Image (spheres, grey):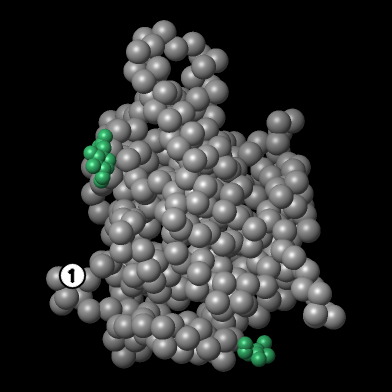
Amino acid sequence: MRRGSDSLAVITSEHGTRLVRRGRRFGRISILQFWLWLFLFATIFLLYFLFFGLKLLSPATIEESPDISVKEQSSPSDGGSKHRKKYFPCEVGLKESVDYVMEPRQVMNFTQFSLHYIDQEEEPSTSRIYEPRFGGHPTLEEREQSFYAEIKLFIADLSEVSSCIFGSSDFLRRPTSRKVSDFSKKTVCFVMFVDEQTLAKISSEGHVPDDTGHVGLWKIVIVKNLPYADMRRTGKVPKLLSHRLFPSSWYSIWLDSKMRLNTDPMQIIEYFLWRTESEFAISNHYDRHCVWEEVLQNKRLHKYNHTAIDEQFTFYQSDGLTKFDSSDPNTPLPSYVPEGSFIVRAHTPISNLFSCLWFNEVDRFTSRDQLSFAYTYLKLRRMNPDRPFYLNMFKDCERRALAKLFRHRAELSTPPVT
Ligand SMILES: *[C@@H]1O[C@H](CO)[C@@H](O)[C@H](O)[C@H]1NC(C)=O
Ligand SMILES: *[C@@H]1O[C@H](CO)[C@@H](O)[C@H](O)[C@H]1NC(C)=O
């Protein structure tokens, strides 16, 4: 049943040993040990899309355009009036400081199992036209199986991508340095992925990486040989597959490039994961809770090919996706639509599995990950009733309190299509 759980057990007991050892020696940990330890920890990364610099882009291809701005576009319920809703941050009770990296025991006590990744897809001998794809060519049957927590299927040749991501560059929205503790500066990796075109663009704007490849706190990583021609899909690789890009990190925080981090990462991990005993935290959408509404909004703003949206949506409905019902006290999520620009994760098996499955949906269907989030979550839960997955879906106003939102570069020059 639990194939490969042996190797996992080793990891678990390693954690256990480390925890015990650290407990005993906490008073005399050297700076070096600390370093080794902590370098495992949180990573924050971002992809800055090359096309932000391109004015040629039609609005239809702009990723997550202006529907997430502090001054919101009128929502459908406004009947198209000029009225603009305003969304404000809310109080977030962060700890004063989190100058330690100690996770409560029970937080690490999540379901353990082993994930298998398929790095190399076998070339089908029958098919004459075989084109390697980043996401492989899983059949619907293989896709179905991949939801079971016993057998893991995920197809991606990530070794290629990671071997291709080196270099240096820079970014516009550096984390607010004074809000980040010295502890986190030493122990958290801030990684920003850019492609070469973006690098040239932001360098020309004065964000030139220093000798170590940093711009402010960001370590700039240049990505070459992008896996998809569609930049929106490419952006989902670092967004959803952090555990594959940073396999030795225990935690990661994803922040869209349109946001500036205003908070210490360790405080974020403490608040969203440890305190709630969660393995995955994501904010809900400030306005929409039902995938039905999200589909309409995506079409209204021409976020994506309508036919492709319909295909995905029809598939989900035929596989049991139902409307969000806020009056149902047993609803498994506070909302079916995430505001996915800020994601906090512990790299536990089921959290990693969920991320992979979510990415596979983005690979197979549209790259609009808000459309596939709830479906993936519900299906994963449905198919693994015995394996809990502690997902913390928090309010978007909390996200606003921690990271300031800016508009995409393209939005400043291109008015949104309505
Ligand atoms: C870990 O979880 C299991 C099952 O949920 C529980 O029985 C056990 O007591 C927990 N262990 C700790 C140390 O919390
Ligand atoms: C839209 O998606 C459909 C189905 O995926 C596809 O057949 C069609 O070629 C796409 N249209 C455009 C303009 O890309």
Left or right: residue 351 compared with residue 329 = right
Residue 397, quarter of the rendered image = bottom left
Element type at mark 1: loop
Crowding at dot 1, Cα within 10 Å, few <14 / some 14-19 / many 20+, comes out as few
In front of the other: 25 or 89: 25
Residue 241, quarter of the rendered image = bottom right
Q: Quadrant of ligand 2?
A: bottom right
- Kindly identify which residue carries mark 1: 330
Q: Residue at 46% x, 66% y: name it.
A: 147
Q: Residue at 31% x, 75% y: name it.
A: 289
Q: Hey, which residue is sitting farthest top in the picture? A: 28
Q: Is residue 163 visible?
A: yes
Q: Residue at 15% x, 77% y: name it.
A: 327
Left or right: residue 360 compared with residue 286 = right
Locate the N terminus and report the quarter of the image it occupies.
Answer: bottom left
Question: At label 1, which amino acid type do we have?
Answer: Asn
Q: Residue at 52% x, 33% y: name it.
A: 40
Q: Is residue 293 above or below residue 273?
A: below
Residue 261 lies, in percent from the top left, at 45, 46
Q: Is residue 312 above or below residue 242?
A: below
Residue 295 lies, in percent from the top left, at 43, 84
In front of the other: 121 or 297: 121
Q: Is mark 1 within 8 Å of ligand 1?
A: no
Residue 50 lies, in percent from the top left, at 70, 62
Left or right: residue 364 compared with residue 211 = left
Left or right: residue 59 compared with residue 16 = right
In front of the other: 182 or 54: 182
Q: Is residue 53 visible?
A: no
Q: Hey, which residue is sitting farthest front in the picture? A: 1
In front of the other: 21 or 182: 21
